[in-house]
Amino acid sequence: MTAIIRATNISYHYPDETNDVIHNLSFEIKRGDWVAIVGHNGSGKSTLARAIDGLLELDQGEIFVNDQLVAQENIWEIRKQIGFVFQNPDNQFVGATVADDVAFGLENRHMPRNEMIEKVNEALEMVEMSQFAEREPAALSGGQKQRVALAGVVAMRPDILILDEATSMLDPEGRESILKLLQQLRQRYHLTVISITHDIDEAAMADEILLIDDGRLVAKGVPNEILMQGDRLIELGLDVPYGEKIKRALVKEDLQTPTEYMDSNRMVDWLWQKLNLTK
Ligand SMILES: Nc1ncnc2c1ncn2[C@@H]1O[C@H](COP(=O)(O)OP(=O)(O)O)[C@@H](O)[C@H]1O
Ligand SMILES: [Mg+2]
């Protein structure tokens, strides 16, 4: 079985509501894949993440993580395998210093002190935050805070990393550097990554995109398929990136542009090539 997460016909409604927030959803996520979940605000993405972590009692269907049914009796076993990073880094800090913060989860697991210090150091090195170990988390930039949050998660050695709009509060530079870091962490720790995002460049990094609308899975495919849909991307809840905006402007001028999806860097490369050729 290569699927690390398998959901079959899951449905859920919040206790005081009548409508399904998740409606008869089925999908599989392959071990080691990077999967982006996109969709409008309110389409049920965070609820789905909670369901995978066993925080909800489903009305219907089942979720398996590592072939284990997500259910009350093995909830702690399941949660050990999943790490979360959320949108607002400020809500995630519990330690007085960066190092304390990264150590928090390990302390809860009663890891021997020496081993813990080693793990914390390794994690901080991995996210290039070693020199901030004794700083107060509050004094860090948004991007640095997310690095520390990632260090705390990675130190726990989860199989699955769920990013719930984890880059959405960062400026473009901070976002790019976190995405680069995520690629490294993913390789080094053989992570399966689920990124819930509105950022098209983040979605473009995925092996597969799941598109959720109103609690339903409305499309899935490789980024090239999903991201080629032009204006529909906005309808789908994605922010249209700079490269695509330029492409549309060129098309309006009747210029031939590549049909595949292009992030900003590829668009810049393509423009350079084009200019050289026609000089
Ligand atoms: N705790 C809750 N109680 C009741 N309704 C909720 C709760 N959390 C979310 N909802 C509703 O469920 C729907 C899906 O929310 P959510 O999963 O947060 O969507 P997304 O993450 O895609 O923005 C929304 O209509 C939201 O208002
Ligand atoms: Mg959400």
Image (cartoon, grey):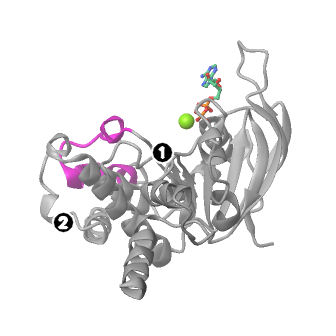
Residue sticking out furthest to the top: 16
Label 2, label 1: how many angstroms apart (C-alpha)? 25 Å
Q: Would the CB of label 2 be found within 8 Å of ligand 2?
A: no
Query: What x and y, as percent, mark residue 211?
Result: 70, 48
Is 208 within the magenta?
Answer: no
Between 137 and 40, which is closer to the camera in this rendering?
40
Element marked by disc 2: helix
Labels in figure, total: 2
Res 160 seen here: no
Query: What x and y, as percent, mark residue 167?
Result: 40, 49
Q: Is residue 129 above or below residue 218?
A: below
Res 150 seen here: yes
Q: Would the CB of label 1 be found within 8 Å of ligand 2?
A: yes
Image quadrant for the C terminus? bottom left
Q: Main secondary structure of the magenta part?
A: helix
Among the two numbered marks 2 and 1 on one chain, the one whose residue lies closer to the N terminus: 2
Identify the residue position indicated by label 2 in the image.
130
Q: Is residue 163 left or right of residue 261?
A: left
For the magenta stretch, what is the residue range?
A: 88-107
Q: Is residue 47 above or below residue 264?
A: above
Three-letter residue code for mark 2: Ser
Q: Residue at x 72, y 38 (%)?
A: 213
Q: Quadrant of residue 30?
A: bottom right
Query: What x and y, as percent, mark residue 210?
Result: 70, 53
Q: Is residue 131 above or below residue 59?
A: below
Residue neighbourhood size for the residue with mark 1, other residues' Cα within 10 Å, grouped as few (<14), some (14–19), many (≥20): many
Between 99 and 185, which is closer to the camera in this rendering?
185
Identify the residue position indicated by label 1 in the image.
165
Q: Quadrant of residue 267?
A: bottom left
Q: Residue at x 66, y 34 (%)?
A: 44
